[in-house]
Amino acid sequence: MSLRQATVERNTKETQIKVSVNLDGTGELNSDTGLPFLDHMLDQVARHGLIDITVKAVGDLHIDAHHTVEDLGITLGQAFYKALDRKGIRRYGHAYVPLDEALSRVVIDFSGRPGLEYHIPFTRGAVGGFDVDLFHEFFQGFVNHALVTLHIDNLRGVNSHHQIETVFKAFGRALRMAMEIDPRSSDVIPSTKGSL
């Protein structure tokens, strides 16, 4: 099996971001975004997806976190797209993850088509000083550049920290399932069209 790794850099007047991924890693995260709560969420993706992720992001945080969060989603999506050979993968992944009172479901399809359904009824507007509206921007950026269909549903929850943490854990688990090589069709593109 070829190495499923990639490094992508994105440099704009608003952000300078470098992301490296190893899709067959051990779940190690090395992240410095200047946004501790976002780093904590990326750690969930790495650990539960068994993906090694390295992130260095410098953004215009003196304005707000919007550009950094959106551009990180874009760059991470580009890295996944570059690292993943679609041949032989399971293609679809899903996970339900609870955390105390919160429960979330994430379903992903490495379809080659970007699509996001995002339903999180947050009970407050910020967690640890982080604007929860920005999570939508992160996932939209990822979807647009990884070319995946992603359905995110927080099914219940009272604590906003628990709500979003279940989403990121489920995202990691769903990625892991979808990117696994299916031993019964390891040389086949999982599509009747023959391409993704």
Image (tube, helix red, strand yellow):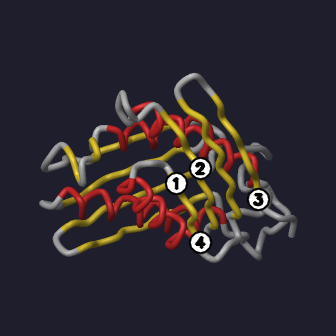
The type of residue carrying mark 4 is Glu
Depth check, mark 3 against mark 2: the one in front is: 2
Residue at position x 52%, y 54% from top? 32
Cα separation between marks 1 and 2: 5 Å
Which comes sooner in the sequence, label 3 or label 1?
A: 3
Depth check, mark 3 against mark 1: the one in front is: 1
Mark 2 Cα shell of 10 Å, populated few (<14), some (14-19), many (≥20): some
The type of residue carrying mark 2 is Lys
Residue at position x 41%, y 66% from top? 169
Q: Are marks 2 and 4 in contact (CB under 8 Å)?
A: no
Q: Are marks 1 and 4 in contact (CB under 8 Å)?
A: no
Residue at position x 50%, y 72% from top? 48
Give the residue at mark 2. Answer: 56
Q: Position of residue 17 (x, y in %)?
A: 61, 41
Mark 4 Cα shell of 10 Å, populated few (<14), some (14-19), many (≥20): many
Q: Are marks 1 and 2 in contact (CB under 8 Å)?
A: yes
Residue 67, compared with residue 162, is above or below; it is above
Which label number is shown at residue 28? 4
Mark 3 Cα shell of 10 Å, populated few (<14), some (14-19), many (≥20): some
Cα separation between marks 3 and 2: 17 Å
Which label number is shown at residue 5? 3
Q: Position of residue 86 (x, y in %)?
A: 75, 54
Which comes sooner in the sequence, label 1 or label 2?
A: 1
Cα separation between marks 2 and 4: 14 Å
